[in-house]
Image: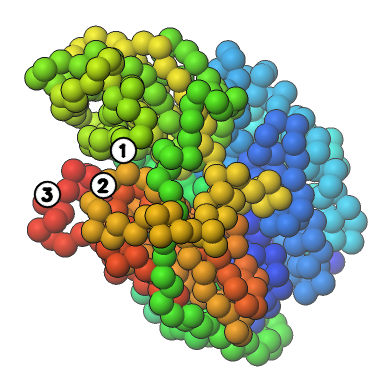
Amino acid sequence: MFWKDGEPFRIIGGDLHYFRVHPEYWEDRLLRAKALGLNTIQTYVPWNLHEPRQGHRVFEGIADIISFLKLCKKLDLLVMLRAGPYICGEWDLGGFPAWLLAEEPAIRLRSSDPAFLDLVEKWWGILLPKISPLLYSNGGPIIMVQIENEFGSYGDDKAYLHYLVKLARGHLGDDILLYTTDGGARETLGKGTIPGDAVFSAVDFTTGDDPWPIFKLQKEFNAPGKSPPLSAEFYTGWLTHWGEKIASTDATFTATYLEKILSMNGSAVLYMAHGGTNFGFYSGANTGSNEADYKPDLTSYDYDAPIRESGDVDNAKYKALRRVIAKHSTEPLASIPPDNEKMGYGHIEIDKVSFLYDMIDMKDLVDVVESENPISMEAIGQMFGFVLYASEYNPKGNGSVLSIPKVHDRAQVFISCTEDSAKRPTYVDVITRWSNRPINLPYLKCESKNKLFILVENMGRLNYGPYMFDRKGILSSVYLDSRPLYKWKMLPIPLQNLNEATQINPIILNAQKGLPKRSAQKKLKDKKNSVLEPAFYTGHFSVDKVRDTYISFRGWSKGIAYVNEINIGRFWPSIGPQCNLYVPAPMLRQGENTLVILELESPNTDLFVSSVDHPDFTCGPTRSALRKSREHRLLSS
């Protein structure tokens, strides 16, 4: 068993990630976790949130981990800290900063590659001294620190694991309990942990598996007498990718299997106790059988957890799990807080402010990179958002065939005449990572060459599996009629990510400024225009009582939304299942609020969105449309 202050202790914990919750709601969500009966909070630490650019470190706002840990201490909640360097967590690149992918020669992630270990040492040299004063032995809440996460499902590099142990001990001392988490099978435990007492080997397994044979196996990988049974991820729900039906796990089923652990003095950590939201561009992705079988995650990380995305606890799962936990708690549980009030602020009229291409002049922009061949997003110093690739070619009377063997992740193709900058570019088609195929470029009669524009969207890096080295953009030559096309210009269009609120992207600001100054011409109110060209849309809505809300994008296609200059995430209702994006009250202000939308394809024909008071995961194509959809391969799980 675990011991705490000389007394037997059982961990009844839950994952709650500070970076998926608005900081003003941290205490609210922790109190709901405490009322569920939890005595421990487990959280990851995403390296990429805290060091978005090499050497530029962020520990403020949603990245203020120290304030979060102190709040746990204030509320008498212990902490299991999953310090990385890799976290998985359905988070972009498993928490690694994307600038690691730009290192040359290429580094080997999660390995004893000296170049990688040097960067880990620098990062932990910043992080671990910050958390050291908050260890339990120093009067803080942290009782355990995880050094790797499910490594046995990835590799078998014991030198790497030993290095992490040595590094953690050097900063944190010998009193802290270090741990690993691996799937509850002999092979994954054998690869993913260090036998003996250098680290404690915790396990995870599918909810529905008999836990006790797995706990018996766990003992073989811990020192004798030092293997209290611990499921470090007891799954209360599951993740959902775009194009899938929203994941749901029965409340009674979940509670029954938690009872199987707790009834025999086992410990468990609910994954997730509260999921939260993948604000900004931080949602990750998974693969299936190969690298092209790409499955990006939703903006919502509700996870069908007992504490829902908006903090709601008046649901069957919360009540069922609480009843089980109450039976095994030594003290009465705190009273359940009421759900927070949510409001719908109604119909929001939207105006088109500008086409994306109208805001770009590649001749005058200093950020343009030129190269004979296309290069990756990371190689041009951009980590998230979009890259516009541009080249020129001589048109053929019968058209041409364009192919891109490797594009990550979704490319919209346009053509125009070099001499006619006033005319709208012609939309051609989409090339995607998951259904890559050649497309036909129609003949466009021009006085000189044709311009080719390829707008590539980074939809989230892989966070798990063998293909994690997931660079973005065009990663191969571009072929026109089977011959490579040379001389490229690349323009980064990063827009704005979650932890960059103090550096609002000028494109977003310009789109926002366009609304108050619009004239009848500027308004561009071509509601029936079916041009599939990325464009910015802006609207205002008035808030009297500031409460949580959701923005419904039913009738829109695909894009990104900003409320009061904060990136609230991706929407894609044409694929589904998520229709509405959650907007926590602290992102709103009393009076006028601003919404900016980058719609990549087709807006709602009536140019409006709705502010509503509830989530909605029922969007997606109809069955008949599914059969015809070029992107429907994304829908298979």
Q: Position of residue 559 (x, y in %)?
A: 40, 52
Label 2 or label 1, whichever comes before in sequence order: 1
Q: Which amino acid does the dot numbered 2 rest on?
A: Val
Mark yes or no: residue 384 visible. no
Q: Quadrant of residue 249?
A: bottom left
Quadrant of the frame with the N terminus: bottom right
Give the residue pinned by disc 1. 424
> Do residues under tags 3 and 1 come within 8 Å of each other at their CB atoms?
no
The residues tagged by marks 3 and 1 sit, at their Cα atoms, a distance apart of 28 Å
Mark 2 secondary-structure assignment: loop
The relative height of residue 177 versus residue 437 in the rendered view (above or below) is below
What residue sits 59% from the left and 57% below the top?
A: 566
Q: Residue at x 46, y 59 (%)?
A: 519
| Amino acid under disc 3 | Lys
Quadrant location of residue 4? Answer: bottom right
> Where does label 2 land, which residue?
531
Q: Are marks 2 and 1 in contact (CB under 8 Å)?
A: yes
Location of residue 458 (image quadrant): top left
Circle 2 Cα neighbour tier, 10 Å, few/some/many (<14 / 14–19 / ≥20): few
Front-most of residues 285 and 341: 341
Q: Is residue 489 above or below residue 299?
A: above
Q: Which of the two discs, 3 and 1, sits closer to the camera? A: 1
The disc at residue 628 is: 3
Q: Residues within 10 Å of mark 3 (few under 14, many from 20)?
A: few
Inter-mark Cα distance, 2 to 1: 9 Å
